[in-house]
């Protein structure tokens, strides 16, 4: 076995390429793990949107009837009472949908750990070449 000081340029280059290949393999493993985590996050967000929609429907029907009845008792006409309660329900459901969509935004799903690591590895590879 040769000592580190007497290694030839082809040997050093071969070692550098081998280390770079191992680094790229590690980066793929990191990306795969992070993307799996992000996919799980998407699944949970979609589940929350679906659960919110399913639970909201019957609850809103009952609440809207109660609010409409209260408005009618307070002196509003039936059409105005139903219009006001329907508008309120639309605002609540819009807020739930917006919350779910925010959890699916591109920034929330970006594999930031992998991208940061790739940038550090890129800088390290440039240092190795110098």
Image: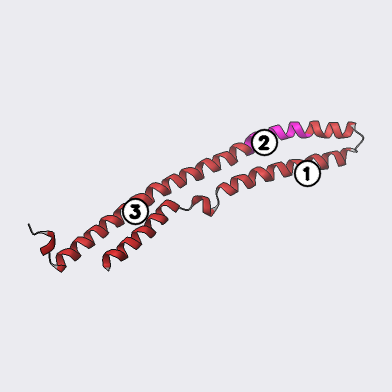
Residue 113 falls inside the magenta stretch: no
Residue at the limit of the structure toward the right, as seen here: 75
In this figure, which residue is indicated by the disc labeled 2?
56
Specify whether 75 is left or right of 1.
Answer: right
Give the numbered dot on residue 98.
none
- The quadrant in which the C terminus is found is bottom left
Q: Position of residue 89 (x, y in %)?
A: 74, 40
Q: Nearer the viewer, residue 129 or 21?
A: 129
The vertical placement of 71 against 94, above or below, is: above
Packing grade of label 1 (10 A; few <14, some 14-19, many >=20) is few
Q: Which residue sits furthest front?
A: 5
Residue at the image point whose x is 87% and y is 41% from the top: 80
Q: Indicate which disc, 1 or 3, sits on the residue closer to the N terminus.
A: 3
Coordinates of residue 36 in the picture (x, y in percent): 42, 46
**What residue is shown with label 1?**
87
Element carrying mark 3? helix
What residue is pinned by disc 3? Answer: 28
Q: Which one is in front, 3 or 95?
A: 3
């Amino acid at each position: 076995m040769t000592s580190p000081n007497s290694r030839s340029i082809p040997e050093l280059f071969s070692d550098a390429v081998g280390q770079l290949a191992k680094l790229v393999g590690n980066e793929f493993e990191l990306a795969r793990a992070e993307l799996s985590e992000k996919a799980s996050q998407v699944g949970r967000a979609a589940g929350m949107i679906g659960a919110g929609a399913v639970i909201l429907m019957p609850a809103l029907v009952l609440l809207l009837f109660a609010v409409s009845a209260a408005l009618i008792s307070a002196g509003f006409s039936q059409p105005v009472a139903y219009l006001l309660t329907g508008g309120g329900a639309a605002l609540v459901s819009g807020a739930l949908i917006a919350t779910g969509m925010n959890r699916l935004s591109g920034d929330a799903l970006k594999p930031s750990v992998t991208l940061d690591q790739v940038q550090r590895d890129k800088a390290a590879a440039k240092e190795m070449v110098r």
